[in-house]
Protein backbone atom coordinates (compact mmCIF):
# COMPACT_ATOMS: atom_id res chain seq x y z
CA UNK A 1 0.00 0.00 0.00
CA UNK A 2 2.82 2.39 0.93
CA UNK A 3 4.61 1.42 -2.30
CA UNK A 4 1.50 2.27 -4.38
CA UNK A 5 1.10 5.56 -2.55
CA UNK A 6 4.77 6.40 -3.13
CA UNK A 7 4.51 5.62 -6.85
CA UNK A 8 1.37 7.77 -7.10
CA UNK A 9 3.13 10.73 -5.48
CA UNK A 10 6.12 10.28 -7.81
CA UNK A 11 3.79 10.18 -10.82
CA UNK A 12 1.97 13.36 -9.74
CA UNK A 13 5.28 15.12 -9.04
CA UNK A 14 6.66 14.09 -12.43
CA UNK A 15 3.51 15.32 -14.20
CA UNK A 16 3.70 18.65 -12.36
CA UNK A 17 7.37 19.11 -13.24
CA UNK A 18 6.72 18.29 -16.91
CA UNK A 19 3.82 20.73 -17.04
CA UNK A 20 5.93 23.44 -15.45
CA UNK A 21 8.76 22.82 -17.92
CA UNK A 22 6.35 23.03 -20.87
CA UNK A 23 4.79 26.24 -19.50
CA UNK A 24 8.22 27.78 -18.84
CA UNK A 25 9.45 26.79 -22.30
CA UNK A 26 6.40 28.38 -23.93
CA UNK A 27 6.86 31.56 -21.92
CA UNK A 28 10.52 31.74 -22.94
CA UNK A 29 9.56 31.08 -26.55
CA UNK A 30 6.97 33.88 -26.51
CA UNK A 31 9.43 36.24 -24.83
CA UNK A 32 12.02 35.67 -27.56
CA UNK A 33 9.54 36.37 -30.38
CA UNK A 34 8.30 39.76 -31.59
CA UNK A 35 4.54 40.29 -31.68
CA UNK A 36 3.79 42.36 -34.78
CA UNK A 37 0.64 44.46 -34.44
CA UNK A 38 -1.02 46.49 -37.19
CA UNK A 39 -3.22 49.55 -36.47
CA UNK A 40 -5.24 51.19 -39.24
CA UNK A 41 -4.28 54.71 -40.29
CA UNK A 42 -7.56 56.55 -39.66
CA UNK A 43 -8.09 59.25 -37.01
CA UNK A 44 -9.26 58.96 -34.28
CA UNK A 45 -8.38 55.23 -34.34
CA UNK A 46 -4.75 55.48 -35.38
CA UNK A 47 -2.50 58.20 -36.80
CA UNK A 48 0.83 59.96 -36.40
CA UNK A 49 0.61 63.54 -35.14
CA UNK A 50 2.77 66.50 -36.26
CA UNK A 51 5.40 65.63 -33.65
CA UNK A 52 5.73 62.13 -35.10
CA UNK A 53 3.96 60.47 -32.15
CA UNK A 54 1.59 57.58 -32.80
CA UNK A 55 -1.79 57.85 -31.15
CA UNK A 56 -5.45 56.91 -31.42
CA UNK A 57 -8.14 54.81 -29.76
CA UNK A 58 -7.26 51.52 -31.44
CA UNK A 59 -3.53 52.32 -31.32
CA UNK A 60 -3.71 52.62 -27.51
CA UNK A 61 -5.83 49.48 -27.17
CA UNK A 62 -3.33 47.57 -29.32
CA UNK A 63 -0.43 48.97 -27.31
CA UNK A 64 -2.03 47.51 -24.20
CA UNK A 65 -2.16 44.08 -25.87
CA UNK A 66 1.54 44.33 -26.67
CA UNK A 67 2.46 45.43 -23.14
CA UNK A 68 0.42 42.73 -21.41
CA UNK A 69 1.71 40.00 -23.71
CA UNK A 70 5.14 40.26 -22.06
CA UNK A 71 6.66 39.87 -25.53
CA UNK A 72 8.75 42.20 -27.61
CA UNK A 73 6.27 43.92 -29.89
CA UNK A 74 5.82 46.46 -32.66
CA UNK A 75 2.64 48.45 -33.29
CA UNK A 76 2.70 49.94 -36.78
CA UNK A 77 0.13 52.35 -38.21
CA UNK A 78 -0.75 51.25 -41.75
CA UNK A 79 -3.25 51.97 -44.52
CA UNK A 80 -6.14 49.57 -44.00
CA UNK A 81 -5.82 47.58 -47.25
CA UNK A 82 -2.06 47.16 -46.78
CA UNK A 83 -2.65 46.03 -43.21
CA UNK A 84 -5.03 43.30 -44.41
CA UNK A 85 -2.55 42.17 -47.05
CA UNK A 86 0.26 41.94 -44.48
CA UNK A 87 -1.94 39.93 -42.09
CA UNK A 88 -2.84 37.54 -44.90
CA UNK A 89 0.84 37.12 -45.82
CA UNK A 90 1.85 36.58 -42.18
CA UNK A 91 3.97 39.75 -42.05
CA UNK A 92 1.97 40.98 -39.06
CA UNK A 93 0.33 38.92 -36.33
CA UNK A 94 -2.84 40.76 -35.39
CA UNK A 95 -5.09 43.65 -36.35
CA UNK A 96 -8.31 45.31 -35.22
CA UNK A 97 -11.19 45.25 -37.70
CA UNK A 98 -14.86 44.64 -38.15
CA UNK A 99 -15.54 41.12 -39.36
CA UNK A 100 -16.34 41.82 -43.01
CA UNK A 101 -15.39 39.52 -45.88
CA UNK A 102 -12.03 41.19 -46.63
CA UNK A 103 -10.78 40.88 -43.04
CA UNK A 104 -12.04 37.30 -42.65
CA UNK A 105 -10.15 36.35 -45.80
CA UNK A 106 -6.98 37.84 -44.31
CA UNK A 107 -7.14 36.40 -40.78
CA UNK A 108 -9.09 34.57 -38.07
CA UNK A 109 -11.40 36.14 -35.49
CA UNK A 110 -9.86 35.95 -32.00
CA UNK A 111 -12.07 37.99 -29.66
CA UNK A 112 -14.20 41.15 -29.59
CA UNK A 113 -12.06 44.20 -28.86
CA UNK A 114 -14.94 46.67 -28.35
CA UNK A 115 -18.48 47.54 -29.45
CA UNK A 116 -18.96 50.62 -31.62
CA UNK A 117 -22.05 52.59 -32.57
CA UNK A 118 -22.76 53.72 -36.12
CA UNK A 119 -24.56 57.08 -36.11
CA UNK A 120 -25.76 59.81 -38.44
CA UNK A 121 -24.88 63.41 -37.76
CA UNK A 122 -27.50 65.73 -39.25
CA UNK A 123 -27.73 69.29 -40.51
CA UNK A 124 -28.75 71.92 -37.98
CA UNK A 125 -32.50 72.65 -38.16
CA UNK A 126 -33.05 69.63 -40.45
CA UNK A 127 -35.61 68.18 -37.99
CA UNK A 128 -34.50 64.62 -38.80
CA UNK A 129 -35.47 62.41 -35.87
CA UNK A 130 -35.57 58.82 -37.14
CA UNK A 131 -33.94 56.69 -39.82
CA UNK A 132 -37.09 56.93 -41.92
CA UNK A 133 -36.67 60.71 -42.06
CA UNK A 134 -33.70 60.15 -44.38
CA UNK A 135 -36.09 59.24 -47.22
CA UNK A 136 -35.20 61.37 -50.26
CA UNK A 137 -32.28 62.91 -48.35
CA UNK A 138 -28.74 63.72 -49.42
CA UNK A 139 -26.14 61.92 -47.31
CA UNK A 140 -22.34 61.70 -47.09
CA UNK A 141 -20.70 58.28 -46.67
CA UNK A 142 -17.09 57.29 -45.97
CA UNK A 143 -15.51 55.73 -49.09
CA UNK A 144 -17.04 52.33 -49.87
CA UNK A 145 -19.28 52.16 -46.79
CA UNK A 146 -22.79 50.72 -47.00
CA UNK A 147 -25.57 50.57 -44.43
CA UNK A 148 -28.45 48.13 -44.84
CA UNK A 149 -30.59 50.17 -42.44
CA UNK A 150 -30.58 53.08 -44.92
CA UNK A 151 -30.99 51.06 -48.09
CA UNK A 152 -33.38 52.73 -50.50
CA UNK A 153 -33.87 55.88 -48.41
CA UNK A 154 -31.37 58.57 -49.56
CA UNK A 155 -31.89 60.07 -53.00
CA UNK A 156 -28.18 60.96 -53.20
CA UNK A 157 -25.11 59.42 -51.54
CA UNK A 158 -21.80 61.27 -51.81
CA UNK A 159 -18.60 59.46 -50.81
CA UNK A 160 -15.47 61.07 -49.36
CA UNK A 161 -12.08 59.89 -48.10
CA UNK A 162 -12.23 60.73 -44.40
CA UNK A 163 -14.58 61.60 -41.55
CA UNK A 164 -13.17 65.13 -41.23
CA UNK A 165 -14.58 65.94 -44.66
CA UNK A 166 -18.00 64.64 -43.66
CA UNK A 167 -18.18 66.92 -40.60
CA UNK A 168 -17.08 69.95 -42.63
CA UNK A 169 -19.56 69.25 -45.43
CA UNK A 170 -22.53 68.82 -43.08
CA UNK A 171 -21.65 72.05 -41.30
CA UNK A 172 -20.92 74.25 -44.31
CA UNK A 173 -22.62 72.97 -47.46
CA UNK A 174 -26.23 73.70 -48.29
CA UNK A 175 -28.45 70.89 -49.48
CA UNK A 176 -26.76 68.16 -47.43
CA UNK A 177 -28.93 66.49 -44.81
CA UNK A 178 -26.37 64.46 -42.89
CA UNK A 179 -23.44 62.06 -42.83
CA UNK A 180 -22.77 58.58 -41.44
CA UNK A 181 -20.01 57.99 -38.90
CA UNK A 182 -18.59 55.50 -36.52
CA UNK A 183 -19.46 57.37 -33.33
CA UNK A 184 -15.95 58.27 -32.08
CA UNK A 185 -15.06 59.93 -35.40
CA UNK A 186 -18.03 62.31 -35.26
CA UNK A 187 -17.16 63.76 -31.85
CA UNK A 188 -13.40 63.72 -32.47
CA UNK A 189 -13.57 65.79 -35.67
CA UNK A 190 -16.28 68.06 -34.29
CA UNK A 191 -13.97 68.97 -31.42
CA UNK A 192 -10.90 69.13 -33.68
CA UNK A 193 -12.62 71.65 -35.97
CA UNK A 194 -13.74 73.84 -33.07
CA UNK A 195 -17.41 72.91 -33.42
CA UNK A 196 -19.97 71.58 -30.95
CA UNK A 197 -23.27 69.65 -31.01
CA UNK A 198 -25.06 73.02 -31.10
CA UNK A 199 -23.74 73.47 -34.66
CA UNK A 200 -25.55 70.32 -35.85
CA UNK A 201 -28.94 68.65 -35.69
CA UNK A 202 -29.98 65.43 -33.99
CA UNK A 203 -27.74 62.38 -33.75
CA UNK A 204 -29.55 59.34 -35.17
CA UNK A 205 -28.55 55.81 -34.15
CA UNK A 206 -28.02 53.70 -37.28
CA UNK A 207 -26.53 50.56 -35.71
CA UNK A 208 -25.86 50.05 -32.01
CA UNK A 209 -22.99 47.99 -30.56
CA UNK A 210 -21.36 46.79 -33.78
CA UNK A 211 -18.57 44.32 -33.03
CA UNK A 212 -14.95 45.30 -33.57
CA UNK A 213 -12.70 42.23 -33.54
CA UNK A 214 -9.08 41.36 -33.01
CA UNK A 215 -8.09 39.15 -35.94
CA UNK A 216 -4.88 37.10 -36.02
CA UNK A 217 -2.86 35.50 -38.81
CA UNK A 218 -4.26 32.15 -39.84
CA UNK A 219 -1.13 30.16 -38.93
CA UNK A 220 -0.73 31.60 -35.42
CA UNK A 221 0.04 28.82 -32.87
CA UNK A 222 -2.82 27.81 -30.59
CA UNK A 223 -0.93 28.64 -27.37
CA UNK A 224 -0.26 32.20 -28.51
CA UNK A 225 -3.87 32.62 -29.63
CA UNK A 226 -5.12 31.57 -26.21
CA UNK A 227 -2.70 33.91 -24.46
CA UNK A 228 -3.74 36.89 -26.60
CA UNK A 229 -7.45 36.07 -26.32
CA UNK A 230 -7.22 36.18 -22.52
CA UNK A 231 -5.53 39.60 -22.73
CA UNK A 232 -8.10 41.03 -25.18
CA UNK A 233 -10.96 39.81 -22.98
CA UNK A 234 -9.39 41.43 -19.91
CA UNK A 235 -9.06 44.79 -21.67
CA UNK A 236 -12.63 44.53 -22.95
CA UNK A 237 -14.00 43.82 -19.45
CA UNK A 238 -12.03 46.75 -18.03
CA UNK A 239 -13.93 49.06 -20.47
CA UNK A 240 -10.75 50.70 -21.69
CA UNK A 241 -12.45 51.59 -24.97
CA UNK A 242 -15.15 53.61 -23.21
CA UNK A 243 -12.47 55.56 -21.31
CA UNK A 244 -10.62 56.32 -24.55
CA UNK A 245 -13.85 57.62 -26.15
CA UNK A 246 -13.87 60.40 -23.56
CA UNK A 247 -10.18 61.11 -24.08
CA UNK A 248 -10.62 61.45 -27.83
CA UNK A 249 -13.60 63.77 -27.86
CA UNK A 250 -16.90 62.36 -26.60
CA UNK A 251 -18.25 64.28 -23.62
Image (spheres, rainbow, N blue to C red):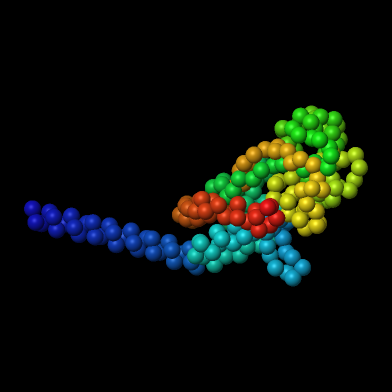
Q: Nearer the viewer, residue 130 or 74?
A: 130
Report if residue 99 is visible in the image.
Answer: no
Q: Nearer the viewer, residue 238 or 149?
A: 238
| Residue extending farthest right | 174
Residue 52: x %, y % from top left: 73, 69
Residue 5: x %, y % from top left: 13, 55
| Residue extending farthest left | 1
| Residue extending farthest bottom | 51
At 82% from the left edge and 33% from the top edge, which residue is drawn?
154
Q: Quadrant of residue 21?
A: bottom left
Residue 228: x %, y % from top left: 51, 55
From this view, report whether residue 95 is shown above or below residue 131. Answer: below
At 64% from the left edge and 45% from the top edge, which residue is drawn?
116
Q: Nearer the viewer, residue 7 or 130?
A: 130
Q: Is residue 221 left or right of residue 82?
A: left
Report if residue 194 is visible in the image.
Answer: yes
At 68% from the left edge and 52% from the top edge, which residue is drawn?
250
At 20% from the left edge and 59% from the top edge, which residue is drawn?
10
Q: Quadrant of residue 176?
A: top right
Q: Nearer the viewer, residue 163 or 28?
A: 163
Q: Is residue 21 left or right of residue 66?
A: left
Residue 107: x %, y % from top left: 60, 48
Amino acid sequence: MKLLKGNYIKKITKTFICSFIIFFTLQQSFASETLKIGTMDLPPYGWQNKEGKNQGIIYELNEEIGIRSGMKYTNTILPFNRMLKMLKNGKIDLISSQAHSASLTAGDKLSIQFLINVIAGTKKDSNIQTIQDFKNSRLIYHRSASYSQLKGLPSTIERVNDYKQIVKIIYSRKGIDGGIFSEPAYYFWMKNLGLSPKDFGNVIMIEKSKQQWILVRKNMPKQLREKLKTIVNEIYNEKMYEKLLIKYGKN
